Each structure stands twice: as C-alpha cells, then as structure tokens.
Amino acid sequence: MFRRFAHLPNERMIPDVRMLHEFRRRLGAGGLRAINDHLSGQILLTAPLRDKTVALIDATDLPASTCDKKKMVNHGAQRMLGWELAR
Amino acid sequence: MPLVSWAAPASVPESYLLKPSLEYCFKRLAFHPDIVVGDMGYIHQQTKHHFRTRWNLAIVTKMKADMLAHCEYSPTAALRCPQGQALAWTGYEPEAQSHWFEPVGSVRLCPWCWQQSSCPKQFSYPADEHETFFGSIPLNTLTARKLLYSVRTWIEPAQSFEKNQLGLKRLFLNNLSFCWTACLLADSAVLIRTLAILAQPKSSEPLADLMPRQAHFNFD
C-alpha cells in the first residue's frame, strides 16, 4: 500500500507474508496508533490552525472477506440409503 | 487529516464512538476540535449536552425527520418575535448557556410595533430548549448551514482517497484485527502526505502580482 502510495516502481519486491505478519503482530494496533499520534501531533504543531477548528465524524463501509467463515455443507462420508424396489 | 479512526463491526453505530474519539483526542494529542459535524441526528442529545456544557464544544447534526415533525422550530425558518419580526442570531453565551437573537432586515416591523417602547430588542433562548436545534450553533443560521452542506461534504473525498487510491477497499479483510492494522496504515499514509504538503516550501514567484489572472490554455 505504501509503495503504491509513494509511486515506488518495484511493487513486486515487497516483504513477504510472514514478515508482514510478524510486523503486524509485534506492533499491534496500539503501536500503529502511537505512530499516528506522533504524526498528528507534528501536524497540529505546524498546521496553520484558525480560531475555530472543525472535525467531521463519519463511518465508511469496508467489505469483509468472510467466505471462509460461512457454514459449509458437510462433505464428509454420508450414510447413503440405497433405493429399494417397492414390492 | 484523520484524527481518530476505529474499525468496528457494521452493527456499531458511529455515534457511540464520538465520546471515546474526543476523549482519546484530548488525552493523546492535548487537542480537541471546537466544532464536530455529524451526519444525522443519531447522536444522543445527552451527549451533545455533555460536550456543550463541559467542553464548550459544538456538535452540529441535521434534525431527523421525526424530530422535525414534533419540533416547533425549523432549520429553514428564522425565529420570530411575538409580533412576527424575523430575528437574526447574534451569538451564544456559554456562561448563561443561552442564545441571543435580535431583529434584522431592512423592512423591520419594529417602528410600527405597538410594543416597541417596552420591547428589549434582544431575545434569549436557552440552548437546552432543544439540544439538536439550538445546541451551540442554531440550525437555522448561515453558520450551521455552511457546516452541514458545505464543510460536511469534505469527508467524501477524504474517505475515497483511503478506500480507492490507497486501496483499502481491495484488501482481503477477513478479520477485525487485520482491518484495524490496514486502517491505521492508511491513516499513516494520509498523515505523512499531509506532513509532506505542509513541509513543502511554497514556490516564490517574484512576478506573481504582475502575472495575468486569466487562465491560459496549454496546447503542448
């Protein structure tokens, strides 16, 4: 995401899944938030804020990929009852 | 710039996250905005009252349709004095928690009013008479209309940037934990971009004042 954002040409040479997973696990949401807080603090210090500051609150939807969470039909061995001819 | 982001299941209303967002903002950044503009009147009136009285913070939302039907005030109509003269908002007094209105307009009825000798020419309305309509900024004022219909629309391109240009929408978000990480990473990208824009030195053009104002077409 960052490479695409920064227009870096080698999008294929990115850390693999394991490295990204470890990075995510070590940092956690709290670590990322701390980084963002630091960046926000810097912006608030340098941005030319007016007397009144306005914030907007809004939600946006992100599609959840939940195909693997859905209940699947059991494909295990099934007890099949054979057909019998009516007598 | 994104101040606070939350990743939550779709069943969690955004209004529930207003209070934690502002408190988080105040604790971590020692900053809170003066005005918060919401989408619709889904934010509880008690929450609006809390922030108005304790933090002197205005929360501006539109009125819900059912609220409009039962409210004696309308966002599209000016308040009027008992004799029918239209009143304009002159400001909010936080100490008294009340709004002040006074007659306005070139065709004022006041010179012909039989009550003009005893009229105070200023009318006060308590802000908690209707928390959504009055609050800190009454909805029938130009300020509220600009906030709701001009400023509010800025949120769409901001969210579109994160979702479409940064590709948040295309990620395989199969659990909430990963969704948190992706959202916070997207916020980081936006914040770094904002810092870069702020840090970029402005181009000094010595002849800027002499350059023609008219746009020119470049056919290259």
Image (spheres, rainbow, N blue to C red):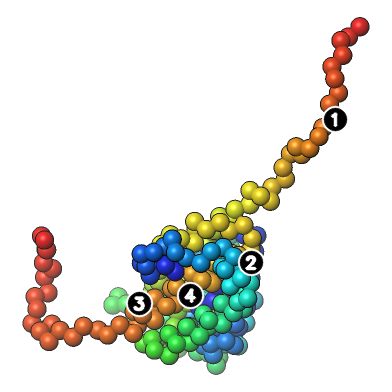
User: Viewer-proximal residue, A71 or B126?
Assistant: A71
**What kind of element bears circle 1?**
loop
Percent of width and height locating residue B40: 53, 65
Q: Quadrant of residue A49?
A: bottom left
Q: Nearer the viewer, mark 3 or mark 4?
A: 4
Disc 1/disc 3 C-alpha distance (Å): 90 Å
Look at the picture and state if A69 lies above or below B208: above
Percent of width and height locating residue B170: 49, 56
Residue at the disc numbered 3: B109
Q: Residues within 10 Å of mark 2 (few under 14, many from 20)?
A: some
Q: Residues within 10 Å of mark 4 (few under 14, many from 20)?
A: many
User: Viewer-proximal residue, B179 or B92?
Assistant: B179
Q: Quadrant of the C terminus of chain B?
A: bottom left
Give the chain letter at badge 2. B
Q: Amino acid at mark 2?
A: Ser
Q: Nearer the viewer, mark 1 or mark 4?
A: 1
Q: Could you tell me if the residues under marks 1 and 4 are in contact, i.e. CB atoms within 8 Å?
A: no
Asked if badge 1 and badge 4 are on a common chain, one would say no
Disc 2/disc 3 C-alpha distance (Å): 63 Å
Q: Could you tell me if the residues under marks 1 and 3 are in contact, i.e. CB atoms within 8 Å?
A: no
Residue at the disc numbered 4: B188
Residue at the disc numbered 1: A79
Give the chain letter at badge 3. B
Asked if badge 2 and badge 1 are on a common chain, one would say no
Residue at the disc numbered 2: B177
Q: Is residue B108 left or right of residue B202?
A: right
